[in-house]
Every structure is written in structure tokens, then in C-alpha cells.
Amino acid sequence: MDLYDTTELSGWLARAFTACGLEPDAAAVGARVLVRTNARGVETHGVSRALVYVQKLKSGELTPKPAVRYEDRAGVLHCRADSGLGQVVATHAVGEAIGRAATAGFVPMVIHDVGHLAALGMFALQAAEAGMIALVAQSTPPIMALPGSKRAAIGNNPLAFASPVAGGPPLVFDIAASGVARGNVLAAAREKREIPLGWAIDADGNPTTDPKAALSGAMLPMAGHKGIGLAMMVQCLAGSLSGALPATVTGAAPGSAPARVGAFLFVANPELIAGRAAYDAHMAGWIEAYRQASGPDGRYPGERAARLEAERARTGVPLPGGVVAELRAAGEAAGVPFTQEPMARTTVA
């Protein structure tokens, strides 16, 4: 893999988004989120999504300049996203919730008709870096089912949670209800390699190692019925509360991402709910107990990503040839050629 400078990569992607109709400030936000996703080690949900976003912006499936508006009803904030690019809308929505949580303590929000958010952990992290607790969940079209199913039954409906940690990087975890994110299957299809058994089923409900067959079938849930239950919880919060239509993406082209989904989030202010000092002390106590029980290699989720981000800010983010080819295609579609030269080459993903 070649290593690419994060600042240069963000600058190019921001110019490409601007050429697709986004305001320059919004384009910079969207680019920064995607590149930072790669920097934190989430390769499947970062710049590898650039091509499909450019395509959807060019086709009008995503709105380059959405008329986003907020409504406050019965103590719940509603964000009407007007099919805006998910990374931009969600960044602003979390910012709005953070601002309100400064005095309200707890702010729940439903986001309607928003573009695919990709790595939800980036928005939970945004809140944690502002000293807040956050949960973010997004509904997806049906892409997951139990073994034997003849078609996808429900979304893999990801969720993310983050909390500040005094003296350390925020605790952040980001999961889908499927055993692995569908982006891993998309990556395998792009790189023409098999996937492990247990990731997916084909269109006949049989286990498969063929990523193309998996994309025509369904992802398998993590922990069987527990994963299905988790997906149903997110479906209630992010899908049914927002009214998002459960359109299917079965058979969609690799790299595709839904353009009008629903999301749910809350931001909570520990200072107003528990007291900052008390919250920080309690967090420190149980994290220390966790470390002692886990041994010298024990860590909480978010620590590795923070270290990786700091390292990649210096060395660059690794991009496989398939992703670079898609960035070139995105540049051609946007009219902003991808001509960035790599900083170095690495054998480590």
C-alpha cells in the first residue's frame, strides 16, 4: 500500500465535493470526516466511500446544498436533512445537540432523510471531544438475515457510543449488528478475494465465501438472535421514529450507500447530570479496574484509534490500489483529478 498525506488528501476531497455543488465549508467538513475515519483505522468507511458519494451528488440523489432545518417537539429535536451528505449533516447536528446540552443536560435528536453516515463513531467522538456522552444510531435498508433466509430481512443498523475520559483519549466504540460491516465484503469484492465463512449468506440462504454472492444475499448477524435484536432496537429508534423507508439494496453495485436514511442520537452532559468531577472519578475507577483485570495489553475502545490517528498524521494513511483507482474515478467524475503522489510505501495495512 502507498501512504498518502492526510492534509493533502482532505484538501483534494474537499475540492472534489465543492465541484459537485457543496459549499466550500461544507465540503471541507465532509472531506475531513472521511479522511479522519481512515486515520483512525476504519478503512471501510472513509475515503473508500468517496466515489459513491460523488456519484450520488452528481446524480441528485444527494442534495449538495440541502435546506436543513431543526424542529423542537415535546423535548425532542428533529433534524430535517433534505438528503444532505451524511458527514456534513451529522457533524452539524451533533454540534447543535452539544450546544443545547450545555444547558439542557440531555438532548435526544431524530434525523430524517439524511445521506449515509458511514462511520458513526466519528460523530460520537465529536461529542466526547467536547466533554459530552453520545450515542448515535442509523437505520439501513435490509442487508442482514439469519441463515436459511431467502432475502435480506433487516438492516445491519450500526450504532456508536462515546464518552470523555479524563487524562486519556475518549472511549469510542462503533459496531454494526452484523458480524462484520458490509464494507468488509465490498472491500473483498473490490480486491477479488474470498470472505470467511460466517460473514454472509447467498441469495439461496446458504453460507458463502464469495463476496459477490454475499452482496446478492445477506450479511449474517453477530451472535445470532442477539444481533437481530440489536438491529430491531436501532430500527425502532432510527428507522421508525424517523419514518425512513426500508428500501432494499440487495444486488446494488459495490460501494453503494443509501441516500435517505434515518438516524437517532442523544448527547448528554455529565457535568449537569452527575457533576464533572464525580463522573470523571467514577470513569477512572472502573477503567483502572478493567485494566488490572485485562493485563498489560488491556485497553479500552478508542485508545488504539487515537494512537493510530496520531501516527498517521505523521506518516500518512495507507490506501490499497483499488481505493486509489476509485479516487481517480471520483476525481474524473467531479472534474478534479486525483494527482496526489504517495509519501511512501508500506506493507502494513
Image (cartoon, rainbow, N blue to C red):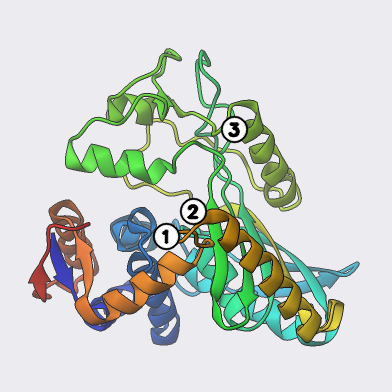
Residue under pointer 1 = 60
Q: Earlier in the sequence, mark 1 or mark 3?
A: 1
What's the residue type where badge 3 is placed?
A: Ile
Numbered tag placed on residue 154 in the rendering: 3
The answer to whether residue 123 of the structure is visible from this angle is yes
The answer to whether residue 18 of the structure is visible from this angle is no
Outermost residue on the right side: it is 74
Secondary structure under tag 1 reads loop
What's the residue type where badge 2 is placed?
A: Ala
The image shows a total of numbered marks equal to: 3
Secondary structure under tag 2 reads loop
What's the residue type where badge 1 is placed?
A: Gly
Residue under pointer 2 = 259
State the residue in front, 34 or 225: 225
Q: Quadrant of residue 77?
A: bottom right
Rendering coords of residue 142 (x, y %): 54, 34
Question: How many residues crowd around disc 3 within 10 Å: few (fewer than 14), some, or many (20 or more)?
Answer: many
Q: Earlier in the sequence, mark 3 or mark 2?
A: 3
Is 298 on the left or on the right of 332, as rendered?
right
Q: Residue at x 53, y 63 (%)?
A: 121
Is 102 on the left or on the right of 297, as rendered?
right
State the residue in front, 81 or 341: 341
